[in-house]
C-alpha cells in the first residue's frame, strides 16, 4: 500500500462505515443508515446533488462531495499496481 492509498482509505473511513448489524454490512454514510450507493445511483439517474441531499437530509454536503472525489482514487488504489 502506498502513502496515497493509506490517505484515501483514512479519508474514506471518516465518511463511510460498514457494520454487520447495519444494513447487513453494506457501506453507509457514517452516522446514518443511508448506503453510499444511494448517492451514486441517484446521480446516475440524473438527480442533482441538491435533490439527493433534500431526499436524504442525514447526508452532509461535505461528506457527499468528499465521497464523490475520493471514489476514483479508491478504485485506482485497489487496482493492481504495475
Image (tube, helix red, strand yellow):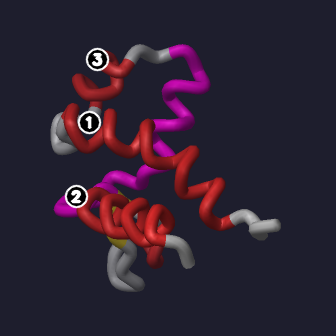
Is 16 situated above or below 73? below
| Range of residues picked out in magenta | 29-46
Is 49 situated above or below 16? above
Q: Which residue is mark 3?
A: 50
Contact? badges 2 and 1 (CB < 8 Å):
yes
Label 1: how many Cα within 10 Å (few below 14, some 14–19, many 20+): some
Q: Earlier in the sequence, mark 2 or mark 1?
A: 2
Image location (x, y in percent) of residue 12 = 36, 60
What residue is drawn where x is 22% and y is 58%?
Answer: 32
Which image quadrant: the N terminus?
bottom right
Image location (x, y in percent) of residue 46 = 55, 15
Q: Which residue is mark 2?
A: 32
Q: Which residue is mark 1?
A: 56
For the residues carrying marks 3 and 1, which lies nearer the camera in this image? 3
Q: Nearer the viewer, residue 66 or 16?
A: 66
Label 2: how many Cα within 10 Å (few below 14, some 14–19, many 20+): few
Q: Earlier in the sequence, mark 2 or mark 3?
A: 2
Amino acid at each position: 500500500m502506498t502513502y496515497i492509498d493509506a490517505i484515501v482509505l483514512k479519508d474514506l473511513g471518516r465518511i463511510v462505515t460498514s457494520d454487520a448489524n447495519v444494513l447487513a454490512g453494506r457501506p453507509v454514510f457514517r452516522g446514518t443508515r443511508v448506503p453510499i450507493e444511494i448517492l451514486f445511483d441517484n446521480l446516475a439517474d440524473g438527480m442533482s446533488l441538491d435533490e439527493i441531499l433534500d431526499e436524504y437530509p442525514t447526508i452532509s454536503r461535505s461528506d457527499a462531495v468528499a465521497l464523490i472525489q475520493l471514489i476514483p482514487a479508491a478504485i485506482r488504489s485497489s487496482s493492481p499496481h504495475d
